[in-house]
Image: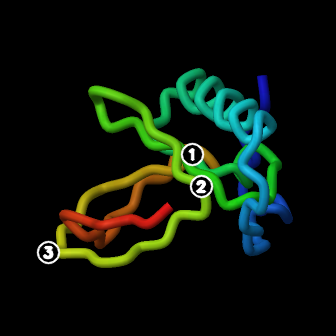
Amino acid sequence: MDKIRIYPDPILMKKAVPVQDIKGEVKEIVDRMKVAMYANRGIGLAAPQIGIPSQIIVVDFGEDCRAFINPELVEGEGDSILEEGCLSLPSLEVPVKRKEGAFIRA
C-alpha cells in the first residue's frame, strides 16, 4: 500500500500535471488511491498525496466512490464553512469555506 505523503513533502508543493493518456495505468493509480484513502479513514485523496504528480482525485460520496481525471471547477453555488481535515496534515482540522454545490468537468 502507498504511504500518504505528509506536508512539507516536496511533491505536495508542486502543481500536479494533467493526465494525457487515460489507460490501464490510470485505473491502477485510482485503485491504489482508494486503498490508501480507506486504509487511512479518508473521504478524499489527490494523486500527489501518494507520490504521483498527476491531476487525479478520488472522492467518497457515501453511496459510492468516484475518480476524477483532470478535474476543473466549472461552477459553484452557495457557501458553507465546515471543519475539515487532510490526510497530508494529520491531527489538524480547520474551518474551510467551500461551495455547497459544484459542477466539475473531468
**Looking at the image, which is closer to me, 32 or 10?**
32
Lower sequence index among marks 1 and 2: 1
User: Comparing marks 1 and 2, which lies closer to the viewer?
Assistant: 2
- Most foreground residue, 102 or 84: 102
- Tell me the quadrant of the picture where the N terminus can be found: top right
Q: Is residue 62 left or right of residue 33?
A: left
The label nearer to you, 3 versus 2, is 2
Residue shown at 57%/50% (left/top)?
A: 57
- Residue nearer the viewer, 26 or 42: 26
Query: Which residue is disc 3 drawn over?
Result: 78
Label 1 neighbour load within 10 Å: few <14, some 14-19, many 20+:
many
> Label 3 neighbourhood size at 10 Å, few (<14), some (14-19), many (20+)?
few
Give residue 16's quadrant in the image: bottom right
Q: Is residue 62 left or right of residue 54?
A: left
Q: Return the x and y of residue 88 as percentages of the image width and height.
A: 64, 50
CA–CA distance between discs 1 and 3?
Answer: 23 Å
Three-letter amino acid code of the residue under disc 2: Ile
Q: Tell me which colouring the rendered structure shows.
A: rainbow
Q: Earlier in the sequence, mark 1 or mark 3?
A: 1
Q: Which mark is residue 69?
A: 2
At which x and y percent is residue 68? 52, 51
Where residue 83 appears, x then y in whole percent? 30, 56
Within 10 Å of disc 2 (Cα), the crowding (few <14, some 14-19, many 20+) is some
Residue at x 45% of width, y 43% of height: 59
> Residue 23 falls in which quadrant of the image?
top right
* 84 relative position to 58: left or right: left
Against 10, is 88 above or below?
above
Mark 1 touching mark 3, by CB under 8 A? no
Q: Which residue in the structure is indicated by mark 1?
A: 45
